[in-house]
Image (cartoon, rainbow, N blue to C red):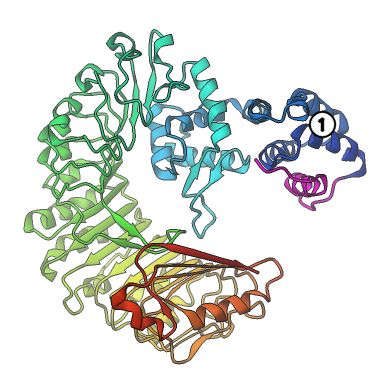
Amino acid sequence: MKRLQMDDSEKLFFKTVFESGKCPNDLLKVSNAILARCNGLPLAIVSIGRMLARRQDKTSAEWQAVRDRLGSELEINPTLEGMRRILSLSYNDLPYHLKACFLYLCAFPEDFEVRRGSLIRRWAAEGLIIGMYDRSLEEIAQICLDEIVSRNIIIPGQIGCSGKIKSCKVHDIMLEVIIAKSVKENFISFLGSSQYNTTAGHDKVRRLSIHPGGTQEKRTFSSKNIVHTRSLTILNSTEKPVLIKFSRLILLRVLDLEGCGWLRNKDLKDICKLSLLRYLSLRNTAISQLPNAVGKLKELVTLDVRETSVVEFPKGITWLQNLNHLLVGGYSYYTRTRSVKHFWWNDGAKVPRGLGNMCALQRISHVDISTEKSSNAMGELGKLRQLTRLCVVNRKEAKLWKPFAKSLDELSNSLRYLMVVDASEKVEELKFLAYLKNPPLSLQSLHLVGRLTRLPGWVSSLSNLASLSLRQTYQLAKDSFEVLAKLPSLVSLKLYDKGYTGRALFEEGWFPQLKQLVVDNLVQLEELSFRGGAPNLERLTLYFPCVPRGGVNGIGKEKLRKLREVEFFGVVIESIFEQVCEAAKEYPNHLKVTREDRPTTTTEAAMQGQGAVSRSQPIRWICLH
């Protein structure tokens, strides 16, 4: 770990603790003593700084007590052991209700990027959080995650335009700290490297995480001490764990098998006997069919079969009256920040009649209504009064939308997220949206894929809409964007292939709250000019199929004072990239300009002559100014 000089250590410490970045005179001496104990290690400085920043009483005596608790390990012996003691102090300072949630992160392997949604659903399934009468378990879990993030003891990964964290990692040294504490308290047991191989020392294994290299362990496995296991995590393994028999794990509540290449349909026979299961993830596996017996999992709250080959749910799925989340389908991400994602149109699963019996459903995606049976099942959606997130795909005729449209009228009060994909490529297949009697006016996120001549009139009334994406809407032009430009809460706008056919973006006063803009392959766009529009823009993601005739104008601190990142992807046009890099020099607080393109192949060499860089293997360039 690279160490900082004392001056830089002070700047980092004071910036972390005090909003002004300045330390009161009465705390300078003890601050220097604390920094001496940190020995210039940034992780230690920030961890202790965050802990002190949260304390209301910032007195010399209080800080001296913290200094004494730190010990002198990092001064005398700046090794990992000293670092562990520093980080242990940050853990010990956590409120009781957060300690278990934080320890739970060690269930995931080193360098694994933990997704927010999966984590909070697992917390809820494990019973690590307690709901309140006016908040759901997941809302409470989100609050817990935000508090842990604010303490700077985990590393934020992807961050949404609203500032909400979408994924996180645990620093490798902090991971060692919480693994050691988990082992000591028998919170989670591990199989993997010998350093973490811990099942042998416990009579009862409550939670078991099998890290890479642990699937073939025999000497520490005992059917006697894992029969009480309530949570089993095996991620990205290629070999089935020796002696693991799902049928014996009758107390299991959480089973996460994401990325397990060995998992086959036949394994589901025993899994479907685990009647206490609340969370089941088969994501990114070779599973292609769910058995009807899945309906026996009466306690199941989350079923995740995203990135699998499942294309139809069995009738038994409708027996799951406690199910909150039914997840299928997948995305491809095209940028480092994941700001550009494409839904796999061939994904999605057909649903059977009886969907209306699943009264606890809050989220269902992606439903394929390309058959009459699945389409008719969507007519029952109106019975699902708790449904907040819905994604629907149709690859065939427009008449299949009718039952879905009827249900939309009945879900107007509950829906917060709606994605509608028409993959038939027929003219105006989404026009049914314009004729809804009770449109979902509480939407916070709307994503439309398919042809439209104009946006539904009710879009102008979406006062809470924060995120909007359009793809292949073809004929939407300037008049529709004047409607969008006035939406008071819109912070994210993504315009994909043929999502906008106008010639220019933006006009004066457009999109006053917008923070994120994605412009992806808009062939007819002749000019990207901000002209006083989008004054709060922070992140801009661009792919141009050719050089816009009118260029890219208005990027600079005079027009876009809050811009902090411009991201290029696809075939990067050199002239535009260089223009933005030059404009970045105007920003005193550094504007980051990144590009993700690929080396030229023989067949694409001609494109280089036009100032473009083509793609084959990812190359990332970052210029900071």
Q: Regarding mark 1 in the picture, which secondary structure is present there?
A: helix
Instruction: Judge the density around disc 1: few (<14), some (14-19), many (≥20) Cα neighbours within 10 Å.
Output: some
Image-quadrant location for residue 215:
top left
Residue drawn 34% across the image and 55% down it: 415
Furthest residue toward front: 602
Please state if 380 lies on the left or on the right of 11 as rendered: left
Residue 441 appears in the rendering: no
Quadrant of the snapshot with the C terminus? bottom right
In percent of width and height, residue 186 lies at 47, 16
Residue 394 appears in the rendering: yes
Q: Nearer the viewer, residue 460 or 140?
A: 140
Image-quadrant location for residue 403:
bottom left
Residue drawn 51% across the image and 54% down it: 159
Q: Nearer the viewer, residue 546 or 219?
A: 219
Mark 1 — residue? 63
Determine if the magenta segment contains residue 5. Answer: yes
In percent of width and height, residue 33 lies at 84, 33
In percent of width and height, residue 245 lies at 22, 20
Range of magenta residues: 1-23
